[in-house]
Amino acid sequence: MEEEKKSLNFLEEIIEDDLKSGKVSSILTRFPPEPNGYLHLGHAKSLCINFGLAQKYGGKTNLRYDDTNPTKEDTEYVDAIKEDIKWLGFNWEKELYASDYFDQLYEWAEKMIIEGMAYVDDQSQEEISAGRGTVETPGKESPYRNRTPEENLRLFREMRDGKYADGEKVLRAKIDMASPNMMFRDPIMYRIKHASHHRTGDKWCIYPMYDYTHGQSDSIENITHSICTLEFDVHRPLYDWFIKVLDIYPSHQYEFARLNLTYTLMSKRKLLELVQKGIVAGWDDPRMPTLCGVRRRGYTPEAIKMFCDKIGVSKHEQLMDIQLLEWCVRQDLNARANRYMVVQDPVKLTITNWPEGKVEWFDCPLNPAEPEGASRKVPFCGELYIERADFMEDAPKKFFRLKPDGEVRLKYTYIIKCNQVVKDAEGQITELKCTYDPSTRPGAGEWRSVKGTIHWVSREHAKKITLRNYDRLFTLADMSQVPEDKDYKDFLNPDSLTLGCGFAEPALLEDNSGIAVQFERTGYYVKDADSTPAESIFNKTVSLKDSYKPE
Ligand code: ATP
Ligand code: MG
């Protein structure tokens, strides 16, 4: 029993206890995005936790948009969020909106006013902030705090009816201006905002605050476990307080550590700035940590879920290594991605003893893990390209690729030997003249092995493709440590995107696997939607190898 408990995370322990004690009979979680931006990898962690727990314990998860801030929200985001959640493979029970509860919340506010638990305050935002006091000193009561319920009700209705300008009045809960918990020092429940809402239009000009909305929304839906990030732990007592005074279904809030990743920023406000200033090409720029960005980069839902599973659920803030995520992407793609040969920095290689005009088509597996599985046909002839870096004139002993008088196998085909190096007037190598050994054809006779195998393409058949090579967007590992006198934009990596080209075996352009492919010996790449019939564009997903090993 003890053993079993150990492997559970703290949320699973809570849920198992609640199910066992009968506190709840089934679990219902929710994912509550504010539709003011696109989902990012941090949200993926929250999604995996909320949907994952529900799945594990036979429960359900609602998708609830936390849409109480009309000036920043938009249906563009509402739609994109749904698309991203579906892409990750999660299905929500109900699609709901905090704005669905505006009438109910308003009714409860009137009830609190009548019962003397809320009042209309005429102080300015600055006066209210100053009056809150500090952790050491108690706050000061507002001069409007002791208005009668009748007066408060009349003023609140006038606020609702549009009689006042933004900021002229607010509705506050009447709790305790000396409370050691600053959250209890008469928190604001409603503010005036003459703005159109993406769903309720111009019906309202007062909007409820987060603290007055979130717990009640959970309660209305009978959410059993309301899971959010650590910074909300100071809000929990207030969450509980509103539920208690309104005497409604007792949802409970639990907090976990948010995901932070090296070389990555996940604040929606800053991501929006990158988009608006044109620093990236859009929310789905493959350098962005957004789900649409990493999707365009070629990351798979499986890899992201594997990553979330590996990092687990904890109560302590942590900076996770982006290399762990990249490792997960490699793990997943290594098992599934089709292989193709692409030469990026070509040097011409001529096979002098190859019969003039002959083309031999090799049947090569799409995935070496399944040698009997699907294959592609690769043309071989006397004029090829190999990678410039795969040849070295004055090669050290350990260099097992091509060198003068040395042998190497051209992947899937013959062993060749380099006999002559041709150079131009500047001394730049322009051609390698080689001979092939016909007896080394795989499957024909005895297998002869050489130390090195390199990739190649037939010059005549090669398709030129455009490459977008991506690197980290930022140069600082811990982006929470940007010095006071600097801006996060000072740490943008100027080389986060470099354009290149490649020469690909023809089958690449017919690939319809729908996921990233492996360019053998280099990395994983995915075809970009910007491709046209005339130009194929491939985004670099992740390089093939890294010294990184997860613990
Ligand atoms: P941001 O600060 O980037 O604007 P947010 O927390 O305001 O993010 P929401 O749309 O309110 O974004 O988040 C929806 C849910 O996702 C919340 O429950 C929130 O706690 C969770 N979430 C947001 N960022 C992270 C993160 N980095 N790691 C884990 N969960 C996160
Ligand atoms: Mg938020």
Image (cartoon, rainbow, N blue to C red):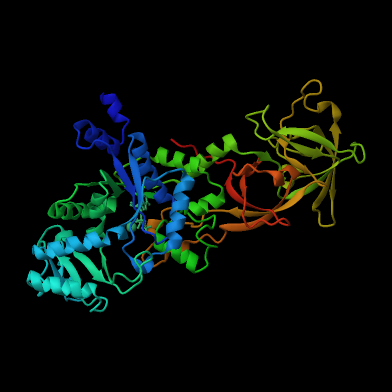
Vertical arrangement, residue 110 with respect to residue 90, above or below: below
Q: Tell me the quarter of the image containing the C terminus.
A: top left
Q: Percent position (x, y) of residue 272? A: 44, 64
At a point 31% along the width and 58% down the height, the residue shown is 100
Q: In this orientation, does residue 395 appear?
A: yes
Vertical arrangement, residue 367 with respect to residue 112, above or below: above
Q: Percent position (x, y) of residue 425? A: 85, 57
At a point 30% along the width and 26% down the height, the residue shown is 4
Q: Tell me the quarter of the image containing the N terminus.
A: top left
User: Between 496 and 181, which is closer to the camera in this rendering?
Assistant: 181
User: Between 349 and 376, which is closer to the camera in this rendering?
Assistant: 376
Q: In this orientation, does residue 407 appear?
A: no
At a point 57% along the width and 59% down the height, the residue shown is 495
At a point 22% along the width and 77% down the height, the residue shown is 168
Q: Percent position (x, y) of residue 195? A: 34, 72
Is 538 on the left or on the right of 240, as rendered? right
User: Between 21 and 231, which is closer to the camera in this rendering?
Assistant: 21
Q: Percent position (x, y) of residue 546? A: 55, 41
State ligand 2's quadrant.
bottom left
Q: Quadrant for residue 66, please give it.
A: bottom left
* Residue at the extreme top: 446
- Figure label count: 0
User: Between 108 and 465, which is closer to the camera in this rendering?
Assistant: 108
